[in-house]
């Protein structure tokens, strides 16, 4: 294949140089779908309220973390890959089966009887790929585990619950643990406008907030919560309406995408 000339690449077509990158292989799966467009709410500014200290309010862009969202679907896949790689790294033998969907109930019973754990991935072609520590299916060679897991997760659908596991292999989440902040609303304004509202109301960000950061934190005066939370409600209305002065949102356009998953639910 190589043409003589061992002392360099003089006169050779640069595309035939031996150090040029190899031609990429096509994906191994026949069916591959992209997620939909980002959802309407994805990356919108949310108004959050601290659960322990009602005076503390946060305005922050949040991701929707919905599977079919073009931004969040791939993030969820990366989270699952990271989690499952860790899970299977600690297990001696991992088995894999690829079955039609209707075989699932019987397969699940078999795994349960063997007291095994499993991870079930739904592939775009409608089949299910199941990893388990029970001796069911084909033993996955140790050296191939990570590549195989990655390939399977890549080929997973972007529908909700595309990936599910038995209890022992669950992805750690906030289940059962209340997050520090609860969501009050999604705001139809940019973060820059939210910051303007805050300054128009004479509120300043506390010292611990990151100045010019990707979120705004303010502490409302205590008496805004008296009289049926009159001041607090007015604050919420101001946020909904945006700053009173006509503002440009151009500065927002160049802002970097905030890659922090926003799973917090009110
Ligand atoms: Zn999203």
Image (cartoon, helix red, strand yellow):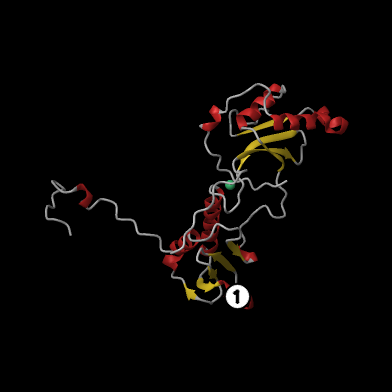
Residue that carries the numbered disc 1 in the rendered image: 111
Residue shown at 51% from the left, 70% from the top: 92
Task: Decide: is 251 above or below 160.
Answer: above
Q: Identify which residue is drawn at 68% across, 26% down.
A: 197
Q: Would residue 124 be found to the left or right of residue 18 on screen?
A: right
Up-down relation of residue 22 to residue 229 (above or below): below
Q: Which residue is at a point 64% across and 54% down the rendered structure image?
A: 173
Closest to the observer, 208 or 96: 96
Is residue 160 visible to us here?
A: yes
Camera-nearest residue between 103 and 141: 103
Quadrant where the N terminus sits is: bottom left
Q: Quadrant of residue 106?
A: bottom right
> Which image quadrant is residue 22 in?
bottom left
Q: Is mark 1 within 8 Å of ligand 1?
A: no
What x and y, as percent, mark residue 32?
A: 47, 59
Total numbered labels placed on residues in the image: 1
């Amino acid at each position: 294949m190589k043409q003589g000339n061992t002392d360099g690449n003089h006169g050779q077509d640069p595309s035939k140089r031996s150090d040029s990158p190899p031609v990429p292989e096509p994906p191994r799966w026949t069916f591959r779908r992209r997620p939909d467009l980002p959802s309407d709410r994805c990356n919108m500014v949310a108004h959050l309220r601290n659960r322990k200290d009602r005076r503390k309010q946060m305005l922050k862009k949040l991701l929707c973390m919905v599977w079919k969202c073009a931004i969040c679907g791939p993030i969820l896949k990366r989270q699952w890959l990271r989690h499952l790689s860790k899970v299977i790294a600690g297990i001696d033998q991992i088995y894999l089966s690829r079955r039609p969907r209707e075989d699932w109930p019987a397969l699940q019973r078999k795994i349960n009887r063997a007291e095994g754990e499993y991870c079930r991935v739904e592939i775009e072609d409608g089949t299910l790929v199941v990893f388990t520590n029970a001796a069911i299916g084909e033993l996955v060679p140790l050296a191939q585990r990570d590549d195989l897991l990655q390939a399977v997760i890549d080929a997973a659908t972007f529908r909700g619950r595309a990936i599910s596991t038995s209890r022992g292999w669950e992805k750690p989440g906030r289940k059962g643990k209340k997050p520090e902040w609860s969501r009050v609303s999604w705001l139809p304004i940019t973060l820059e406008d939210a910051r303007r509202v805050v300054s128009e109301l004479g509120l300043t960000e506390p010292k611990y907030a990151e100045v010019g950061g990707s979120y705004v934190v303010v502490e409302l005066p205590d008496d805004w919560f008296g009289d049926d939370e009159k001041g607090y409600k007015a604050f919420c209305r101001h946020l909904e309406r945006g700053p009173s002065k006509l503002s440009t949102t151009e500065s927002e356009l160049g802002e970097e995408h905030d890659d922090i998953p926003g799973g917090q639910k009110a």
